[in-house]
Image (cartoon, coloured by chain):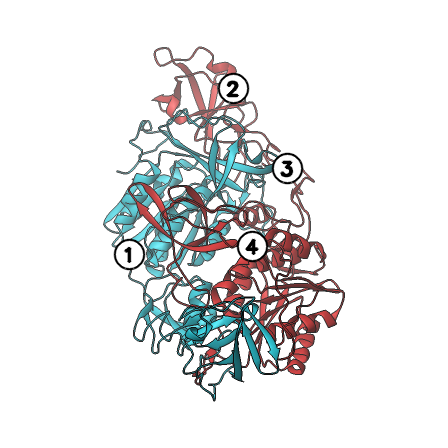
Chain colours: A red, B cyan
Amino acid sequence: MTLEITYYGANMPVNLPLQSPQQALTTWLAAFPERKLESEEIETINAMHRVLAEDIATDTPFPEFTRSGMDGYAVRAVDTVGASENHPVTLEIVGEVPMGGSPDFEIGAGKAGVIHTGGMVPAGADAVIMLENTRLSGTRKLEVLQPVKPGKDVSPMGEDVVTGQVVIPAGARIRAGEIGGLMALGRTRVNVVRKPIIGILSSGDEVVEPHVKPAIGQVRDINSYTASAHIEEWGGIPLRLGIVSDEIEAQRKAVASAYQRCDAVLISAGSSASERDHTAQIIQELGMPGVLVHGINIKPGKPTILAVCNGKPLIGLPGNPLSSLIILRIFVKPMVERLLGLPMNPFQPSVRATLTQNLKSNDGRENWWPIRLVQSTEGIQAEPIHYKSSLIFSYLPAQGFVRVPGNAAGLAAGNPVDVYLI
Amino acid sequence: MTLEITYYGANMPVNLPLQSPQQALTTWLAAFPERKLESEEIETINAMHRVLAEDIATDTPFPEFTRSGMDGYAVRAVDTVGASENHPVTLEIVGEVPMGGSPDFEIGAGKAGVIHTGGMVPAGADAVIMLENTRLSGTRKLEVLQPVKPGKDVSPMGEDVVTGQVVIPAGARIRAGEIGGLMALGRTRVNVVRKPIIGILSSGDEVVEPHVKPAIGQVRDINSYTASAHIEEWGGIPLRLGIVSDEIEAQRKAVASAYQRCDAVLISAGSSASERDHTAQIIQELGMPGVLVHGINIKPGKPTILAVCNGKPLIGLPGNPLSSLIILRIFVKPMVERLLGLPMNPFQPSVRATLTQNLKSNDGRENWWPIRLVQSTEGIQAEPIHYKSSLIFSYLPAQGFVRVPGNAAGLAAGNPVDVYLI
């Protein structure tokens, strides 16, 4: 399974069997457990995008009382039969339902009560007639201009949910609507899955910290910072553990320490292959099953390592900035989601646009192209950005990526494509 | 412009001219300035999704030195002419380029140097031949199995960007790639537009704080919390200012204070129309031009107020939870983006799915339907969730919304639709 690359001693094995990105992801995710993180109680207002660690059930029905869905008048439907613009039915207004309280009157035959949206429907009434379908004909005289059916614009108690119903299940990712639902139940604190801690190691003798002025031949570490930003966005806690040299003992120590401290480990490669080789070897020593994927049939991003050691995922990221970004998105995002106990999400939103150039996948690898989106009179155009994956700035004008399947002849200009936003 | 709703005194004006959501948004955004917030300096690692307040230019070329794009050997291309598997060209390996340093050798005729991806190409070499296209035939003898052209797998100094080039312009929203770009330049701190402070007032005599057990007729405040969660997600600072009663003087005071303190104000309606009427009147008193839109041709979400007073936007949100969520997305998201100085984003990602039921827009209003997405053997299905906008829990299983245009006959089952994820 390990890839041997040496320079003076032996030749590099060529034509390694590379898995497709989909195969590689499936293999990898299947090898580590879906849910193992503890929960923690936090303020609901801070729970956006967190994963619920408990079933949330109602302790009352919703609505808690039968309420009006409109501004208008609570009436007995039977009293409105035959009402029309020319032959209105006249009712007597007996009171107004106070907001936040209960009405101190009932609706008898021929009577009506002023009611506001959300107000409690008084006893005796079985419908609300909206304001627009009425006319006042005197201080307490209401003309009804249309008949209403029983139940019209009335939300019965428990219409939304009944008592004891699970309204948000454990494992759900909390969105704004769920925050509203929790608040409706008075749940101002909530148990969520703690964020997984993802250790990030940078490696490479040529790599220096961003605040350092690189000497000749050196480059600043950027990939551990892009990884960090993405991991935070996706719901993990990034833990940058600094830059480790290409020397195998230093790497072994650093990786083992990160593996002990974290829920998952990213090793952001320096750019040399010999150093990546150390990575696979070192990971393999940490536990079973070890390295599952070493090299993926994707461009850019081929030199990626996917591993699981004793249930804990590790990933070796390629050193080129664009490759690293693409691998983060394709593999690290679902890894974080998996650690949080979320299912694989088959619903990936995209912007549909018209491709402006042919894109080939002539090497049989799945190609990911950075795309600049342009709004034109003929709709949204997808302009591929020609790039080298080693470049840092050239692809920044891209809004997204398009995927060119490895087994296809490519994508033809003029056709619609799905652009996944960055 | 103001909508008169009284219950005992006069009839409600009907058939108000309602603007379409698109018209309403355009009218509103055009009335407040695109950029007026100050900048602040923050750590680049915390700058994800922030808006850049300065042009970022390079102070060196990138790459800073001519470097290898591959693991392999630095060579003179002319030496490899005619090389093949059967008739390899043999070169002498004269050294290895150290990572993070400069080579202490040059490449003369018939010579090659070991080089790693990112390594500095030695003087004399004009190409890199990848490892896979070579073979070692002795300790220092290299067999080249394919010719390479000059420049092959070499990134010349400045290939990405030259010195003084603006690589990230002011006004750009910072993504992971931009964080990488900033780090590559050693910019560990960066000037960004400060987050706009969005004041959120809840109103309604029936509304109580989430930690309070509602008395009969009362409901808990949920909309100010969903608004808060979304505003934070979209790049603003939500400032919840509590619940104000329906009484006009209390409202006037609360709105005026919020207007003074914040960059924009949301007034989350209680559910009664009379109370919403106060909102429009109170906003109108704050400054010119005042209320621009009162009532939008959308369902749910019609009773929405859009206003600008002396360049500061205010919005009156409908009281129903689902209406509020939809109006937040359609109006408050672009409002926050506008305050940050971002242009209108025409690229809204969606999931394409097959509609399972006919959806009508028979009242001529633009309808937004909550959609449950289901992965089936025939692809992704979009199942509309039938709802009342007053309900809190019934629509939570939705992953997104579909838009049914107001002027259309509706959307027919079996057709593809764009589902905008929540």
Of circles 4 and 3, the one toward us is 4
Residue at image position (51%, 19%) is A76
On residue A61, the disc is 3
On screen, residue A125 versus residue B234, left or right, reads right
The quarter of the picture where residue A216 lies is bottom left
Distance from disc 4 to disc 2, alpha carbons, whole Å, reads 46 Å
**Camera-side residue of A63 and A122:** A63
Q: Nearer the viewer, mark 2 or mark 3?
A: 3
**Residue that label 1 marks:** B34
**Chain to which the residue tagged by mark 3 belongs:** A
Q: Residue at x 38, y 37 (%)?
A: B303
Residue corresponding to mark 4: A49
- Badge 4 crowding class, 10 Å Cα cut-off, few under 14, some 14 to 19, many 20 or more, is some
Q: Is residue A419 above or below residue B385?
A: below
When asked about the image quadrant of residue A85, the answer is top left
Select label 1 or label 3 by which is in front.
1
**Separation of marks 1 and 3 at Cα, in angstroms:** 45 Å
Point out the tag, 2 or 3, that comes first from the N-terminus.
Answer: 3
Q: Residue A272, percent across and down?
A: 55, 74
What whole-number distance in Å separates the C-alpha atoms at marks 4 and 1? Answer: 29 Å
State how far apart marks 2 and 3 are (Cα): 24 Å
Name the residue that disc number 2 marks: A76
Chain label for disc 2: A
Q: Nearer the viewer, residue A143 or A226?
A: A226
> Is disc 1 in contact with disc 2, using a CB cutoff of under 8 Å?
no
